[in-house]
Amino acid sequence: MADMKDELKKEFEKATAYELTDHDIERARLLLGIDLAARDNEQIHTATADNIRTFAYGCGNDNPLHCDPEYAESTRWGGVIAPTMMAGVVNRPMLGDALDADIKAQTKSVFRGIHVFISGGEWLFYRPIYPGDTLYSFTGAETLEVQPSEFAGRKVNRITRQVKINQRAEIVAVYRYREILTERKTAREKGKYSKLEPAKYDDEAIAKIDEIYAQDVPRGADRWYFEDAVVGAPLRPSASGPLTTTDIVTFHAGGYGWVPYGLRVGRYWHKNRKRIAPFYIKNENGIPDVAQRLHWDSAWAQAIGNPMAYDYGVMRENYVYRYLTDLAGDDGWVYRQYDEIRKFNYMGDVQFISGEITGKREDAGLNLVDVKVKMTNQRGEDTLLCDASIALPSKHKPVLLPEPPAELKERAIRMMARHWELNAARRRGKS
């Protein structure tokens, strides 16, 4: 055990040679406001009934609207639709105009070797994802702020917008996510959470969690009407966890984690190490392994200042989305989800989900119910806070889908047209 810790300490010292510098911060500001076609080559390019079901299961979501084609045929959608947050893991490389050569040169390897994690963001959902839909995206950083951090001395807080569009140039969703960039060395030296002990459960504790799960079922065809929503009323309780390594594995199996760094095997592992060497840090056996293994390798998580491995924040975002869509029912539509990830979700932690209705309003033809939702762990700590808006049917009219801003729709059409133009030119060049 001592030898293992010594080896990891050596690797940690190598990995922490990278610093969060003022020079990098200023270089990163050059990229603000620039939209680029996303070249991300995700594991999933096109949605199918099978990969929709696999993704849903990876998020603990067994809603038949996503998983049972026969059931889904009887709904307003006419067939299976994906949990719309699946847009985050579906992407075919999009062709587009390159970044200005001067800016590209000035921003090369910016924030190289710096620890990055997602601390929440805002999703706006506009269109369903059907089997057969191929998704593309364009993306760009919107804001960048330097802030003090209890965990890591100082941090960079960067908001990046990603616009997801289908093959018809329809905007499916817009995601603004919050990236936190910190130095690994500083984070370890602070060691704020290093004294936490893994949660333990007896049969009685597991039985109480099982009771919550047993009552937490999708609303399905039982319509929740706008008129019946009562401001101040509590939402039904739910749960997620306790977190295990199996949860991480199934989330990856559902399609998460293919880009930008990725989990690679064999010859592909070799090629990826040549491409992004700082992402690989030797384990206690001398094998170069991904830095993101802190999500399943507690020894490595401890080496960089955490008490044990922890989840991806985006996992909890998907769990909350599952909760919201279960509440909305087959005829409802989750329009907006804004969440802030406040605490780590460590191995063994269970998240209890609760919420209340905070408002009702009509906006652009939509009957919207606003809700607040939070996740609270077994230590009584709120780990995620969420504001969401759900479009519900009224007793007089069905739910309409929201419309994206006109300027953004035009932008999406131009980006998609440029993709097809460049794609046609590429094919001519090969013929």
Image (cartoon, rainbow, N blue to C red):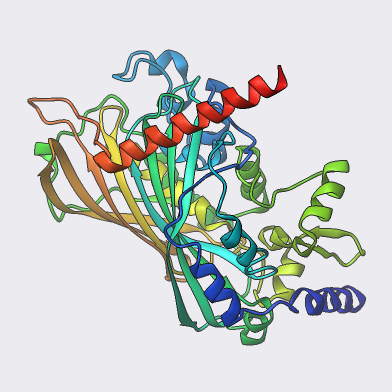
Q: In which quarter of the image is the N terminus?
A: bottom right
Residue 42, picture quadrant: top right
Camera-side residue of 338 and 245: 338
Camera-side residue of 192 and 177: 177
In this view of the protein, can residue 401 be seen by the observer? yes
Residue for point 86% across, 78% down: 10
Residue for point 29% across, 32% down: 329
Where does the image place residue 331, in percent across and percent down from the top left? 26, 27
Q: In which quarter of the image is the C terminus?
A: top right
Where does the image place residue 409, in percent across and percent down from the top left? 31, 37
Residue 227, picture quadrant: top left
Above or below: residue 281 compared with residue 164: below
Above or below: residue 271 compared with residue 81: below
Residue for point 67% across, 76% down: 184
Taking the image as shown, residue 367 lies to the left or right of residue 334, namely left
Taking the image as shown, residue 350 lies to the left or right of residue 338, namely right
Camera-side residue of 167 and 225: 167
Where does the image place residue 379, in percent across and percent down from the top left? 47, 71
